[in-house]
């Protein structure tokens, strides 16, 4: 995971500049469970800074320094009270030792997909059980695996989106080519970023990554074995039903 995000860190905020559909959901959960928040996979700070601005005390960990460096730069321009409520840590969630608990732990936006083996994803959930305080909750946001498993593998290179890289103004054409192993539930994706520079030359960045898909019955059993109880599961951040065809699988466990 670390190598992938080091490669694409400079594109990440530009690519996700309009992603905000999850923020009200997380704010509502801090109102419900408490504003002491752990974020596993804090990335460039999109969620962490918003929750700190909302009044939460936030501990955001990530194992990719390039992502956290961008988060810290954004935090530097935040008001002093926001900076005081937020701490970023360059930590591996499977190795870090935390001597505190949190009312809310978030594994946001596909982060769990980077934990491929049972020892890794179940080990993380066990650690979360120790980090979530009594009366608190763990939240996991994943894509609905059914949609990807139903899609046909073609091996085609697909244009995913085009966006402007905010620091340079360069046009970025983002492509992907993917293969899915339906037995191991691993999708191997090669992301291709074609950056059109001012002189019209194209700089290509290749970023391969492996993502593991989870189905709800599997995730429910993993959480229950780790000591959690499912409090809710939704198909999107508007709390719509988790059902066939929904875009997300958002689980809250207590």
Image: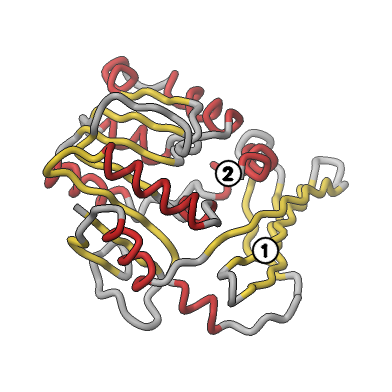
Residue that appears at 67% across and 62% down:
189
Residue that appears at 34% across and 29% down:
59
Task: Name the residue that disc number 2 marks.
Answer: 12
- Coloring basis for residues: secondary structure
Is 216 in front, or is 127? Answer: 127
Label 1 sits on a secondary structure element that is: strand
Residue that appears at 36% across and 38% down:
39
Res 68 label? none
Residue that appears at 54% across and 29% down:
70
Q: Name the mark nearer the viewer: 2 or 1.
A: 1
How packed mark 1 is, by other alpha carbons closer than 10 Å (few <14, some 14-19, many 20 or more), is some
In the rendered structure, the answer to whether residue 65 lies left or right of residue 207 reads left
127, above or below 223, in the image:
above
Is 29 in front, or is 167? Answer: 29
In the rendered structure, the answer to whether residue 199 lies left or right of residue 67 reads right
Is 95 in front, or is 207? Answer: 95
Looking at marks 2 and 1 on the same chain, the residue that comes earlier in the sequence is marked by: 2
67, above or below 228, in the image:
above
Asked whether the residues under the numbered discs 2 and 1 touch, taking CB atoms below 8 Å apart as contact, a structural biologist would say no
Q: Position of residue 250 (x, y in %)?
A: 32, 62
Label 2 sits on a secondary structure element that is: helix
Q: Position of residue 96 (x, y in %)?
A: 44, 29
Res 188 label? 1
Is 98 in front, or is 60? Answer: 98
- The image quadrant that residue 135 belongs to is top left
Q: Position of residue 248 (x, y in %)?
A: 39, 67
- The image quadrant that residue 190 belongs to is bottom right
């Amino acid at each position: 995971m670390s190598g992938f995000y080091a490669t694409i860190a400079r594109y990440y905020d530009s690519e996700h500049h309009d992603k905000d559909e999850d923020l009200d959901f997380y704010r509502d959960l801090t109102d419900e469970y408490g504003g002491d928040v752990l974020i596993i996979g804090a990335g460039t700070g999109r969620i962490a800074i918003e929750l700190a601005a909302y009044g939460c005390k936030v501990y955001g960990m990530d194992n990719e320094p390039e992502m956290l460096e961008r988060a810290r730069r954004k935090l530097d321009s935040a008001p002093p009270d926001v900076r005081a409520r937020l701490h970023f840590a360059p930590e591996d969630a499977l190795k870090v030792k935390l001597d505190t608990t949190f009312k809310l732990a978030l594994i946001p936006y596909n982060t769990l997909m980077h934990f491929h083996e049972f020892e890794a994803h179940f080990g993380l959930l066990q650690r979360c059980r120790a980090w979530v305080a009594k009366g608190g909750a763990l939240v996991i946001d994943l894509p609905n695996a059914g949609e990807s498993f139903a899609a046909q593998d073609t091996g085609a290179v697909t244009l995913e989106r085009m966006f402007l890289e905010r620091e340079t103004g360069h046009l970025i054409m983002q492509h992907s080519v993917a293969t899915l192993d339906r037995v191991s539930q691993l999708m191997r994706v090669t992301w291709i970023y074609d950056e059109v520079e001012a002189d019209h030359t194209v700089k290509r960045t290749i970023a391969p990554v492996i993502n593991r898909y989870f189905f709800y019955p599997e995730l429910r059993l993993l959480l229950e074995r780790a000591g959690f109880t499912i409090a809710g599961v939704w198909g999107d951040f508007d709390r719509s039903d988790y059902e066939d065809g929904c875009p997300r699988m958002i689980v809250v466990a207590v």
